[in-house]
């Protein structure tokens, strides 16, 4: 599915533009004009677009499934963008992207590319010098790979053959013309197949990792009876070693390349340093160093972080690091905590580094991956002139990612958008972002915002009664307000506000929508496989319809350790599941009638009757679509 990775996506860096599919027309790239294009009905659009017509005719899509893409396409037409309708389908989380590109290639008579990956990688290595660096960068941005070079039958002139997932793009011909490629043919190849070749052949090497591998300097460990006061004397000497510095820099670079959200650095029980990467929500060991003290490496990290005291080991510290990696400025937020060790007399620390890569910020709400009904309700709520939209869920459930994507939908030069955050992680163009500090707390910031003529306000989190009441006041006085809470589901978010002390009538009229969100890992599209014998008792317990007849219709993670797409993990990327609770008249009535408590079960029952999918319902849909596994559904939703 064409679903974004919620900030954890593309692992390719020299080819970072390859996944940014900007809409373009068949003849030339789409450019906005000042004149809206003539209105067209849904039926006319489906008939006139040969690719869409073919997809409908073959049953790959349904008219209902096309509606969100049609509405987005109509909005582009109103803005003067001349995009073909079928390209909008590649942005839909409900439609298989590769199927769309395959059918488009057939409509426009592009032949399929047939090749072996090993042969192509050898070919690329042999002909790497045929094009300069700019040409290779241009090809990578288009996911365009040369796969053969043969003489013309009559003239003998060299004829190149290229493979790409979208051979209809006009930029391909423009690029090849600039490259002075006179004779060529472009063929279709699935993006998943190209990904493995690009990853193996073109991702830039981590120079610090190479230096680390070539480092001859190996430190000698001190004896186990070394006194604590001797540790400081050795730190300076060990920190000067190139091995530690290269290891630290290699970890930063490799984390960015791997799509890591957080780097965890800590001593294991043996006192050796371990570095773990959190990718797609799970921690994996990246490196274990046996030849240096943990204290030495931790000191190197602290020495490279701004606002961190290397000699302070008994209190929590926060700092930041910045690096240019693959032509982009990457920011790292550093959190340091003292932890206990087996040797009580020696202080140890745990360091977690959050990777902040602005290239991975989602600006298209559709790429979050919400199901159609949830997406429509969410989009409708954020288009209201006032009221509150609440995102709820545990830490790491993607709330901030979704809020940032939502803000990008409503920011225009005609509105004043203010956010209150602690800390400010991503800079949003057109938004005035307020950073909290010891001089400006959340209460003070919210009171100041009321005097700052806002149209739209985002409050990072409602933490107590006072901040909740101020946020609700903003929503009830003509402002569109976004905020978050930490609850397990949507109805309990309403109950939480009541328990904080916010009056029921204020809650009832302030809230437009509550979204409870989780992130599930997506099965790797290349190595996933049908489950030949699913546990029918478990499926029945989880509420799957016809659980006895689902053999071959639910998928499990593949067991291919050599899979180029997921590197043997079985999963790649994540997608949101959501419980979307709109405040309808029936829901408002239930809240208004509450006196001593909010009846969460009554809210849930009414919302389900009005069409709300619960978190398990959403997860079941993704399992049946082959997007995720039953195991992942159980891991994320439990027995809810």
Image: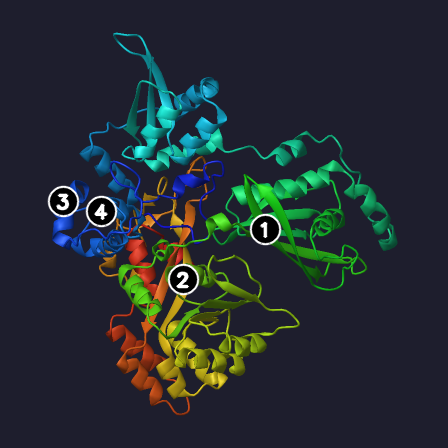
State the image quarter where residue 588 is shown: bottom left
Residue at label 3?
Answer: 48
CA distance separating discs 4 and 2: 25 Å
Whichever of labels 4 and 1 marks the residue nearer the N terminus, that label is 4
Marks 3/2 in contact by CB < 8 Å: the verdict is no
Local SS, label 1: strand
CA distance separating discs 3 and 2: 33 Å
Which of the two marks, 3 or 2, is nearer to us in this view? 2
Relative to 487, is 47 above or below? above
Task: Give the residue displayed 48% in from the left and 48% down from the top.
Answer: 359
x, y (%) of residue 471?
A: 47, 78
Local SS, label 4: helix
The image's mark for residue 331 is 1
Whichever of labels 1 and 2 marks the residue nearer the N terminus, that label is 1
Q: Nearer the viewer, residue 518 or 359?
A: 359
Q: Residues within 10 Å of mark 3 (few under 14, many from 20)?
A: few
Which of the two marks, 1 or 2, is nearer to us in this view? 2
Which of the two marks, 4 or 2, is nearer to us in this view? 2
Residue at label 4?
Answer: 85
Whichever of labels 4 and 2 marks the residue nearer the N terminus, that label is 4
CA distance separating discs 1 and 2: 24 Å
Whichever of labels 4 and 3 marks the residue nearer the N terminus, that label is 3
Q: Residues within 10 Å of mark 1 (few under 14, many from 20)?
A: many
Task: Give the residue displayed 74% in from the left and 57% down from the top.
Answer: 348
Marks 4/3 in contact by CB < 8 Å: the verdict is yes
CA distance separating discs 4 and 1: 37 Å
Quick check: can you spot residue 541? no
x, y (%) of residue 406?
A: 39, 62
The image's mark for residue 247 is none
x, y (%) of residue 25?
A: 26, 41
The image's mark for residue 411 is 2
């Amino acid at each position: 599915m064409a679903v974004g990775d919620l900030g954890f996506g593309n692992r390719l860096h020299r080819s970072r533009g390859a996944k940014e599919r900007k809409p373009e027309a068949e003849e030339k790239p789409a450019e906005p004009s000042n004149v809206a294009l003539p209105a067209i009905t849904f039926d006319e659009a489906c008939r006139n677009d040969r690719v869409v017509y073919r997809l409908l005719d073959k049953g790959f899509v349904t008219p209902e499934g096309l509606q969100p893409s049609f509405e987005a396409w109509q909005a582009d037409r109103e803005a003067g963008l001349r995009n073909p309708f079928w390209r909008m389908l590649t942005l839909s989380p409900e439609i298989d992207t590769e199927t769309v590109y395959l059918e488009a290639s057939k409509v426009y008579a592009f032949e399929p590319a047939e090749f072996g990956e090993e042969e192509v990688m050898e070919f690329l290595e042999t002909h790497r010098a045929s094009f300069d660096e700019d040409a290779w960068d241009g090809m990578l941005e288009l996911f365009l790979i040369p796969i053969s070079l043969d003489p013309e039958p009559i003239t003998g002139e060299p004829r190149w053959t290229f493979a790409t997932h979208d051979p209809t793009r006009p930029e391909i011909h423009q690029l090849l013309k600039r490259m002075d490629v006179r004779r060529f043919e472009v063929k279709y190849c699935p993006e998943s197949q190209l990904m493995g070749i690009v990853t193996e052949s073109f991702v830039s090497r981590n120079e610090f990792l190479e230096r680390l591998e070539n480092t001859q300097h190996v430190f000698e460990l001190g004896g186990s009876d070394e006194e604590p006061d001797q540790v400081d004397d050795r730190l300076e000497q060990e920190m000067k070693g190139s091995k530690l510095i290269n290891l630290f820099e290699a970890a930063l670079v490799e984390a960015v390349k791997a799509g890591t959200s957080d780097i965890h650095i800590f001593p294991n029980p043996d006192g050796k340093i371990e570095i773990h990467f959190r990718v797609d929500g799970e921690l994996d060991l990246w490196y274990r160093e046996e030849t240096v003290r943990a204290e030495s490496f931790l000191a190197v990290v602290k020495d490279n972080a701004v606002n961190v005291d290397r000699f302070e080991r008994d209190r929590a510290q926060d700092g930041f690091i910045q690096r240019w990696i693959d032509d982009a400025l990457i920011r790292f937020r550093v959190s340091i905590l003292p932890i206990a060790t087996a040797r009580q007399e020696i202080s140890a620390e745990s360091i977690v580094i959050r990777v902040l890569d602005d290239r991975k910020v989602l600006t298209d709400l559709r790429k979050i991956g919400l199901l159609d009904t949830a997406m429509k309700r969410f989009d409708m709520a954020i288009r209201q002139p006032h009221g509150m939209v609440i995102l709820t869920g545990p830490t790491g459930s993607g709330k901030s990612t979704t809020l940032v994507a939502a803000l990008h939908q409503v920011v225009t030069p005609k509105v004043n958008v203010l956010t209150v955050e602690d800390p400010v992680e991503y800079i949003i163009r057109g938004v005035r972002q307020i950073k909290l500090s010891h001089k400006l707390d959340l209460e003070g910031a919210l009171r100041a915002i009321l005097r700052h003529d806002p149209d739209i306000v985002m409050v990072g989190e409602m933490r107590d009664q006072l901040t909740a009441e101020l946020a609700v006041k903003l929503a009830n006085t003509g402002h569109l307000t976004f905020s978050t809470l930490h609850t397990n589901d949507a109805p309990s978010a309403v109950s939480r506000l009541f328990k904080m002390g916010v009056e029921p009538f204020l809650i009832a009229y302030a809230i437009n929508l509550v979204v409870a969100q989780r992130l599930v890992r997506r099965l790797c599209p290349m190595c996933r496989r049908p489950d030949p014998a699913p546990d029918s008792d478990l499926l029945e317990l989880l509420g799957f319809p016809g659980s006895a007849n689902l053999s071959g219709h639910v998928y499990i993670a593949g067991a291919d350790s050599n899979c180029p797409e997921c590197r043997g993990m079985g999963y790649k990327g994540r997608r949101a599941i959501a419980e979307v609770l709109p405040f309808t008249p029936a829901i408002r009535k239930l809240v208004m009638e509450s006196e001593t408590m909010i009846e969460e079960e009554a809210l849930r029952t009414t919302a389900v009757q009005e069409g709300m999918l619960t978190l398990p319902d959403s997860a079941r849909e993704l399992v049946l679509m082959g997007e995720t596994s039953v195991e992942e559904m159980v891991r994320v939703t439990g027995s809810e």
